[in-house]
Image: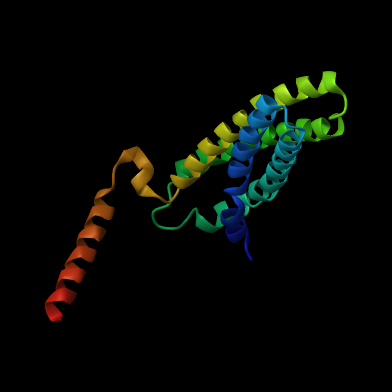
């Protein structure tokens, strides 16, 4: 497996884990359910752990795709800058979550840690969502400016023409 395969295979895990961890933490806090709170903290630690290989494979992935046709070089730089911010936020979220797991029995610190973790989990999700969006702009021209490029329109037209020719042959 190369860095691009690893990057693409894992890049959605931290996004989903941080969202799910935050939602379960809200539910656990509302219902005063210790199991939900613990599970949410484990999910946020896992999100931080999954982020490391995604981040570390980013540079190798850039080297593989930056010269390909249709790759937006400025989108790569924006994605990389946002990924740095995201990595810091999710690392802090994971560390605070880990502290929360160790301090679950201490009610006074636990409430404070859970509150901080809740805010950080949604900050993590927000920055990861933006990082993912910027990553999508690298190759997906249909995401850029909310419109399809002329090249993509021409390619779609060619596909339609080919389908019509194939139908005529039948």
Residue at 63% x, 43% y: name it.
17
Q: Is residue 99 left or right of residue 146?
A: right
Q: Is residue 25 left or right of residue 109?
A: left
Measured from the top left, where is residue 4 in percent x and y? 58, 58
Whether residue 8 is visible to the viewer of this picture, yes or no, is yes
Measured from the top left, where is residue 98 in percent x and y? 80, 35
Please name the colour scheme applied to the rendered image. Answer: rainbow
Near-viewer residue (71 or 136)? 136
Q: Is residue 117 left or right of residue 79?
A: right
Residue at 57% x, 38% y: name it.
128
Residue at 87% x, 24% y: name it.
106
Residue 49 lies in quadrant:
top right
Residue at 72% x, 27% y: name it.
32
Near-viewer residue (164 or 144)? 164
Near-viewer residue (44 or 59)? 44
Measured from the top left, where is residue 103 in percent x and y? 86, 29
Near-viewer residue (163 or 144)? 163
Whether residue 84 is visible to the viewer of this picture, yes or no, is no
Residue 51 lies in quadrant:
top right
Residue 80 lies in quadrant:
top right
């Amino acid at each position: 497996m190369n860095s691009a395969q690893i990057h693409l295979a894992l890049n959605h895990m931290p996004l989903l884990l941080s969202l799910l961890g935050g939602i379960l933490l809200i539910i656990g806090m509302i219902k005063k359910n210790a199991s939900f709170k613990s599970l949410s903290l484990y999910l946020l630690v896992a999100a931080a752990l999954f982020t490391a290989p995604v981040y570390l494979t980013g540079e190798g992935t850039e080297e593989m795709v930056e010269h390909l046709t249709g790759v937006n070089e400025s989108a790569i730089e924006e994605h990389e800058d946002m990924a740095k911010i995201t990595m810091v936020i999710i690392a802090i979220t994971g560390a605070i979550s880990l502290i929360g797991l160790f301090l679950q029995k201490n009610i006074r610190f636990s409430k404070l840690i859970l509150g901080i973790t809740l805010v950080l989990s949604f900050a993590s999700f927000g920055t990861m969502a933006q990082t993912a969006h910027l990553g999508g702009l690298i190759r997906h021209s249909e995401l850029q400016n909310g419109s399809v490029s002329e090249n993509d329109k021409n390619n779609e037209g060619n596909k339609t023409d080919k389908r019509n020719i194939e139908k005529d042959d039948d």
